[in-house]
Image (spheres, rainbow, N blue to C red):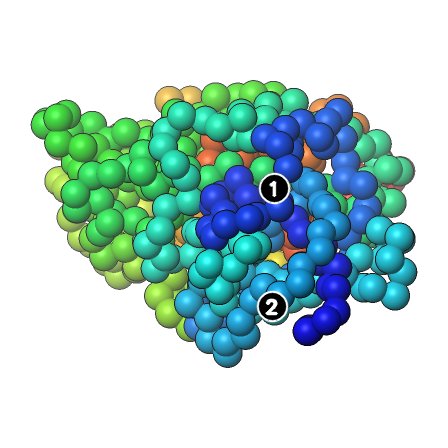
């Protein structure tokens, strides 16, 4: 690159991690505000899929960064060092220099790179990979950029009529732009600076947003660890409070906490959307083959039914003199960070869970949904459930608004652009099913 001027197309929406190094070409803190008014994306981004995995390490949601502002800048030195297995994967935001002035031809090149410390431009986009020890924030007080991100999430909206939905579902470029513009809203790990907390989290920096986290009841309320579980309450359709609980897949250390939450919140349904292992462990097998007791709660398997794409377990829970019924839907046809091969089975599961929820006792609490980290597949399932209700009730859907609301309550919900596109495809299919049924 000696003697050449390389035009680098940089995404400077680094709401998750501050830039490292010096001389970084950052704009003012009005980055998010520059994308107002709240609307769908500008369509500047290519339809290529961004890299999701590097080696066997689990990619966090910020592998799909929130692009909100792009700049042209001259870089006269090598910005990045290539490494086959980077410790901190980053993106090379290169440009197609064949058309210097045409922003529509810009592409995002999926590569795994290692940032050179001390480089004059920091392109690190992910401080949320499990195993990463550096925090991505500088304290609890929101920066102007974070405040703008929060404002975006509170007001972002894009209502789609059925015709608009079908067209939008096929427009990968616009969906990518919209996805990238929407803040992830991750939690600064410094907000959870408690000794011993690391064993309570499956991934070190996938943490529950503080305002909506589930707090476990404990005899010692002063002991934070006894009240903590990596789980958040989420709103449902029409702002129904605490309609869902999104949580990580239980670990060996948190199985007891998980069952405490199930009992405390009077949850009638668990939706599990992960295999126990996918290259590595994604979730502990927290249920028994027959009977087991956790935290004074006796869990007994009543029936196991195997369907084409999921299994259904019915449990009896007993604590003291009280006894309850619990249903677990275990959906196994959805790979991590990706989407199912077919949409109809997911729609069928969403509708089956809705029917089971309607049949649950009136005193029942939220539906628990979890995958491994509790943000990707979990976010897709909850969003689909909420949006199906909106489509039936109002005849329109607002996928952007629902995504924003989910991320306000738990950062990173709907983890990848591919998943965001899939939600649109599922809703488009569901609308066609509704229209076909109406015609009959």
Q: On residue 26, which mark appears?
A: 1
Q: Nearer the viewer, residue 353 or 66?
A: 66
Q: Secondary structure at mark 2?
A: loop
Q: Residues within 10 Å of mark 2 (few under 14, many from 20)?
A: few
Q: Residue at x 75, y 64 (%)?
A: 5
Q: Identify the image quadrant of residue 145.
A: top right
**x and y, in percent, of residue 4 in the image:** 74, 69
What mark, if any, has residue 78 been given in the picture?
2
In terms of image quadrants, where is residue 223?
A: top left
Residue at 59% across / 30% down in the picture? 29
Left or right of 241, for residue 12:
right
Q: Nearer the viewer, residue 34 or 411?
A: 34
Left or right placement of residue 225 versus residue 159 in this view: left
Give yes or no for contact between labels 1 and 2 (Cβ–Cβ under 8 Å): no
Give above or below for 3 relative to 180: below
Question: Does any portion of residue 311 appear in the rendered image?
Answer: no
Crowd band around label 1 with a 10 angstrom C-alpha radius: few (<14), some (14–19), many (20+): some
Q: Is residue 21 left or right of residue 93?
A: left
Which residue occupies 37% across, 46% down?
135
**Residue pushed farthest front?**
3
Secondary structure beneath dot 1 equals loop
Residue 142 at x, y percent in the picture: 45, 26
- Tally of marks: 2
Q: Nearer the viewer, residue 382 or 392?
A: 382
């Amino acid at each position: 690159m000696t003697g050449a001027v390389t035009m680098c197309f940089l995404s400077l929406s680094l709401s998750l991690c501050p830039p490292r190094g010096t001389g970084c070409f950052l704009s003012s803190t009005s980055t998010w505000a520059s994308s107002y008014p709240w609307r769908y994306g500008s369509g500047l981004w290519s339809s290529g899929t961004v890299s999701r995995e590097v080696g066997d390490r689990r990619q966090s949601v910020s592998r799909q960064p929130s692009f909100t502002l792009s700049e042209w800048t001259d870089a006269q030195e090598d910005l990045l060092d290539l490494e086959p297995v980077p410790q901190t994967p980053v993106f090379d935001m290169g440009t197609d220099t064949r058309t210097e002035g045409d922003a529509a031809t810009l592409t995002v090149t999926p590569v795994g790179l290692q940032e050179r410390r001390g480089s004059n431009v920091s392109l690190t986009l992910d401080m949320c990979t499990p195993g990463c020890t550096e925090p991505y924030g500088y304290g609890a007080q929101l920066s102007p950029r974070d405040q703008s991100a929060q404002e975006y999430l509170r007001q972002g909206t894009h209502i789609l009529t059925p015709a608009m939905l079908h067209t939008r579902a096929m427009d990968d470029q616009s969906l990518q732009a919209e996805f990238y513009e929407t803040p992830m809203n991750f939690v600064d790990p410094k907000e959870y600076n408690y000794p011993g907390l690391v064993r309570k989290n499956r991934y070190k920096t996938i943490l529950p947003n503080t305002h909506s986290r589930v707090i476990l009841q404990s005899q010692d309320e002063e002991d934070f660890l006894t009240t903590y579980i990596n789980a958040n309450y989420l709103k449902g359709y029409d702002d129904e409070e605490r309609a869902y609980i999104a949580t990580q897949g239980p670990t060996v250390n948190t199985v007891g906490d998980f069952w405490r939450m199930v009992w405390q919140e009077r949850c009638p349904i668990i939706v599990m959307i992960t295999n126990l292992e996918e290259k590595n462990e994604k979730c502990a097998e927290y249920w028994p083959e027959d009977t087991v007791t956790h935290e004074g709660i006796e869990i007994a398997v009543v029936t196991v039914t195997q369907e084409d794409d999921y299994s259904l377990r019915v449990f009896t829970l007993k604590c003291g003199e009280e006894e309850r019924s619990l249903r677990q839907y275990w959906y196994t046809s959805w790979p991590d960070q990706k989407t199912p091969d077919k949409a109809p089975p997911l729609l069928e599961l969403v509708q089956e869970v809705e029917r089971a929820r309607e049949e649950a006792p009136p005193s029942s609490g939220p539906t628990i949904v979890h995958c491994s980290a509790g943000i990707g597949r979990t976010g897709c399932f909850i969003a689909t459930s909420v949006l199906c209700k909106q489509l039936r009730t109002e005849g329109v859907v607002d996928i952007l608004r629902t995504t924003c609301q989910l991320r306000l309550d738990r950062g990173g919900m709907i983890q990848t652009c591919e998943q965001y596109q899939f939600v649109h495809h599922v809703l488009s299919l569901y609308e066609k099913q509704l229209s076909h049924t109406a015609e009959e």
